[in-house]
Amino acid sequence: MCDRALPGERFIGRVTRKKGNYAEVTKVKTISPPRDIVDAPCEYASHCGGCKTQNLSYEAQLRSKEDQVHELVVHVGRFSNKELESEGVMKPIVPCDIQFHYRNKMEFSFGPYKWLPKESLHEREAGRDNYALGLHVPGFFDKIMNIDKCLLQSDPANKVLAAIQDCWRDPQLGFSPYDVHSHKGFLKHLMLRTGRDVVTGHPEVMVNFVTSSYKPELLKFVVDKVSAFPEVVSIMNNVNSSVGNTSVGEEEYTLFGKSFITETLRGLTFQISANSFFQTNTRQAEVLYELIEKYAGISGDGSEVVLDLFCGTGTIGLTLARSVKHVYGYEVVPQAIADARLNAEINGIHNATFVQGDLNKIDENFGKNFPKPDIIISDPNRPGMHMKLIKFLLKLRVPRIVYVSCNPATCARDLDYLCHGVAEQNIEGCYKLVSLQPVDMFPHTPHIECVCLLELC
């Protein structure tokens, strides 16, 4: 694997890590660029870790992602080309209609130094002119690239970012960015979220300051300035006093407006709080959820029971609840379960039950608190499903599983287990992969979503 190497590019690289048949390479020099190279519209694209393929044409990005999924499903998932191609299992990737300004959430970090290309931390002196608010330099937890505008987030969010950049270094305000080495400083992160007003359809922006302590009087000037934007309906303060540099605080305060923004998805209304999980690309999530519903094959007579694994804030299960008998959702994050229950209440959905529990630690009692489902939706995070859950699914033998993945490598592994079994553990697979649909949720990034339909053999 070579970071920032593009498909079709010839280059000189240096191996920095090798393990078995896997190696990490740093690109030293490009010999010949790919034929699909384009000029990146963002000034930060060459160094920012967010848009690593912005200088590759979008059509070439799609081909590369589709090829990546195909390779992993063949080599890791042990599916033949005949199965994938002649039997029509592998579908063409679904493109994203909007390639910029599609993210509804961005998280920026404060730091005591601006990072500049080819400049080390020790070559600069600390000072307010060198304070940074932006994104982490890839591979470094302590280096921040100052960002004035991000082409992935909404225009209203960029206006807010510019306004904060314009004032926060003013010495009269007394701000100090958090230093991850000395563990001193006040401002840690700035999170910007964008939703849509349910009635008007106008954008709603939430501004969330993550700080090391609670000092509302210190934030007053910038809160007054930002709240003047009509799109800003919520300004929050998450207080994270630990040395850890996460954006989730132990305490949360509302500094202006309400404590949430709203968003609509497939006809439902969702309240999104500062720390809620919500699909980052709302428009493409509509496409993704439509595919999930199609693959679920719901009859429409209200007879099916759906088990929604890794349900998050319940968005998938709630969009299906209108057509089924009951949805049972499981998720490890307590706040996500609380949000799921609230979202069900807001939308008047009474046939959905959400339970907090760790699906990586299930035991023989799991499955006794709900009837045998007709359909399972599984949407795990990047590590995929634990072997305990794989064994549970193989034992349960429901007619249909819709597997949604954000990581094609672990997706291919889990499909292999479910379809072909695990020989070393004497576990037999019992599913057939009927359809595999890649979806591009995040243009200009290497991330790929896949929706897979498995049917009981």
Image (tube, helix red, strand yellow):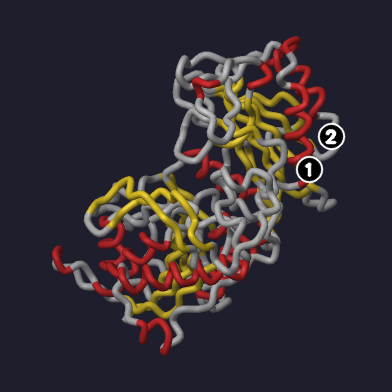
Residue corresponding to mark 2: 229
Mark 1 residue element: helix
Q: Residues within 10 Å of mark 2 (few under 14, many from 20)?
A: some
Which residue shows up at 74% across the image and 41% down it? 157
Q: Is residue 63 left or right of residue 15?
A: right
| Residue 308 in sight from this viewpoint | no
The residue nearer to you, when weighing 309 against 41, is 41
Q: Are marks 1 and 2 in contact (CB under 8 Å)?
A: yes
Q: Is residue 23 left or right of residue 161?
A: left
Which residue shows up at 56% across the image and 31% down it? 144
Image height of 340 relative to 385, above or below: above
Quadrant of the rendering where the N terminus is positioned = bottom left
Q: Which mark is residue 456?
A: none
Which residue shows up at 46% across the image and 63% down it? 10
Q: Where's residue 405, x and y in %?
A: 45, 61
| Kind of residue at disc 2 | Phe
Inter-mark Cα distance, 1 to 2: 9 Å
Residue corresponding to mark 1: 156
The residue nearer to you, when weighing 363 against 92, is 92
Mark 2 residue element: loop
| Residue 313 in sight from this viewpoint | yes
The residue nearer to you, when weighing 387 against 397, is 387
Quadrant of the rendering where the C terminus is positioned = bottom left
Q: Where's residue 371, x and y in %?
A: 38, 63
Q: Is residue 424 left or right of residue 56?
A: left
Q: Where's residue 338, x and y in %?
A: 54, 41
Q: Residues within 10 Å of mark 1 (few under 14, many from 20)?
A: some
Q: Where's residue 366, x and y in %?
A: 31, 54
| Kind of residue at disc 1 | Pro
Q: Quadrant of residue 388?
A: bottom left
